[in-house]
Image: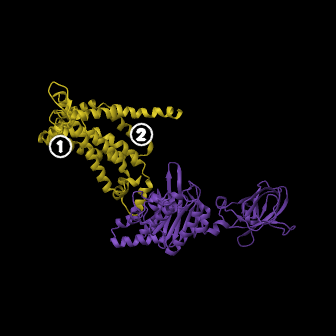
Chain colours: A purple, B yellow
Amino acid sequence: MTQGFDIELSHCRKTYGDIDVLDDVSLQVKNGEFITVLGPSGCGKTTTLRVIGGFIIPDNGRVSIRGREVTNLPPYKRNIGVVFQNYALWPHMTVSEILSFGLRIRKLPREEIARRVDEALSMVQLTGLKDRYPRELSGGQQQRVAMARALAIDPEVIILDEPLSNLDRRLREELRIELKRLQRSLGVTMLFVTHDQEEALSMSDQVVVMQSGRIQQIADPRTVYERPANRFVAGFLGSANFLAGELVQNSRESRAEIKLGNGAVVTAHAPSVKQVGEKVTVIVRPEWLVLERQGSGLPTNQLEGTVGDVIYEGSAIRYGIKLTHEPESPIFLQERSNADVLKPGDKVRINVTNAVIATE
Amino acid sequence: MVAWATRAPLFLPFAFVILFFFVPVCWLVATSMSSHEVGSAPVFTGTLAHYARFWTDPFYLETALWTTVKLSVLSTVLALIIGYVLAYYIAELPPHRRGFLTSMVVVSLSVNIVIRIFGLNVLLMSGGLVDSALTFIGMPKVRIMYTEIGVLIGLVQIAIPYVVLPLIGVIAAIDPALKEAAASVGANKYKTFWAVTFPLSLPGVVAGTLIAFTLNAAAFAIPSLMGGGRVRMMGMMAYEQATVQGNFPFAAAIGISLTILSILITAIYLFAINRTFRTARKAT
């Protein structure tokens, strides 16, 4: 049953020529949820948004908004607020004309329109700029007007297509917090498309990671980052080391021991049941590796190697480490930069504090 | 010195315009205010008699002035309607498919006007294609050639390319997201067109209609060749006065009156556009 979800896509497919832009995409967004669709350009994330908005009709599949099927409805019959990447503010209208346009179409009484325009403007903190034209506003202000226009029509859901990508870094971070606060206080369901992993991790209740028209993983930000489903997700969100190995033990609940090519054994989280002897890829994030400065420790989760590159990154230092007897190196290790700095050529011992087996 | 030498060629265009436009116009104004004696050259006296004759005689006001205003305004409006539909269609095509249709519009411009008129003659004359077709479907016989309708058709078809060409560029340059944004807040295609597309295409509308109007207000070939002497527009009348009657001062007065009329109507038009779409200029 579709009830209970504000946005529901089931088995949506869209093909242009030979290219599957959307390949069997299904997702469900609960009421009041902030969901992010994340992926590199061309992964189908914008197509997903446009299918929800009604700007693209999928070849197959269903789209429902609040339980109402809208698959073949044009955008103007959907009641979805859309925030476009370049804001798409009508250059020949003032801010109040832009915000009231959708309300005038709905033939609301004049006082009601005025009230809702003021309300939308105060939500995005733009009171007093009613009579400005878009070109008289800064990028950040234009972004807020675009947001207010989407809010003013009192939509069932709001979809946003990389709304912060045209802003400079400081403003982007500021608006990120503001947008999230607004979403939470209004309780409005939002689907947010971005290629920026930081945006996705910091704002979302759920993250949808896409690649080549397919959904790679849907989970909350922590799970997506700490338990990436596959190499792509691990590599796209943050950086990751991939180590090839063979499963030697699968005793405890979702924990497994893996023997790497150089004989070292690491324990890793196993999201699905694996057979002993199976070849697997272990994902290890740079900050999950800790340099052992005082001698040897435990028998497992220890790696040995030689420091190669030393990269200073301000708050952190990143080492490229060539593992002994391990072809798939260097692996990268990150630690806070207030620790003693190692030099290229130093022999090191590394403790693996966390690792995940990729599902494929 | 060097700076002067490198900039000097820039004055050539100005010199050209002054020599070949302003000088003749001044000469024309002077001629229009000269005395007229049959058989002798005009002598400048500063008289406004020729203007008085044109602007007070009901014959000239009705046959020439009214016909000119009516036909040029009507042909511009019709050319805008037909041209807008054409331009909108072309602009909505994917870019690689716009080229062919656009070049067809350009080609129609490059065909000599007299040839186009003769083509229209063949189509519209009694016993021509249109006439035969109308007769065939049992319509009563109507005269098109050598009537105002015939001249109007001629003027419209001359004007269409001038309306279409600037509009294609302007409409195609409108960000599709602006239309999608209108749809997202509930505007159907019709509302989106009138609220977004049309206002944003106004610069093209103004450019096209101004060219079409000024061209048709001063039309000479079409009323001459398609009006059969019955449809008199001011350009034609000035020509007649100069070549047939030999009355150069009166011909000049008609010409200057036509120019002033054109400028006046254009000014009213631009004023009205600015009033109705007070924000049109800000759009760009």
Whether residue B234 is visible, yes or no, is yes
Whether residue A88 is visible, yes or no, is no
Vertical placement of A227 versus B280: above or below? Answer: below
Task: Give the chain letter at badge 1.
Answer: B
Residue B240 in the image, given as x and y percentages of width and height = 18, 31
Local packing at callout 1 (Cα closer than 10 Å; few below 14, some 14-19, many 20+) is some
Say which mark, if any, is on residue B99: 2
Kindly state the secondary structure of the residue where label 2 is placed.
Answer: helix
Residue B238 in the image, given as x and y percentages of width and height = 20, 33
Local packing at callout 2 (Cα closer than 10 Å; few below 14, some 14-19, many 20+) is few
In this orientation, which residue lies closer to the viewer: B122 or A258? Answer: B122
Q: Residue furthest top?
A: B39
Corner quadrant of residue B105? top left
In this orientation, which residue lies closer to the viewer: A308 or A6? Answer: A308
Disc 2 from disc 1: Cα separation: 40 Å
Residue drawn where x is 24% and y is 38% of the image? B256
Corner quadrant of residue A339? bottom right
The three-letter code of the residue at mark 2 reads Gly
Say which mark, if any, is on residue A160: none
Of the numbered discs 2 and 1, the one sitting upstream in the chain is 1
Residue labelled with disc 1: B66
Residue drawn where x is 40% and y is 65% of the image? A96
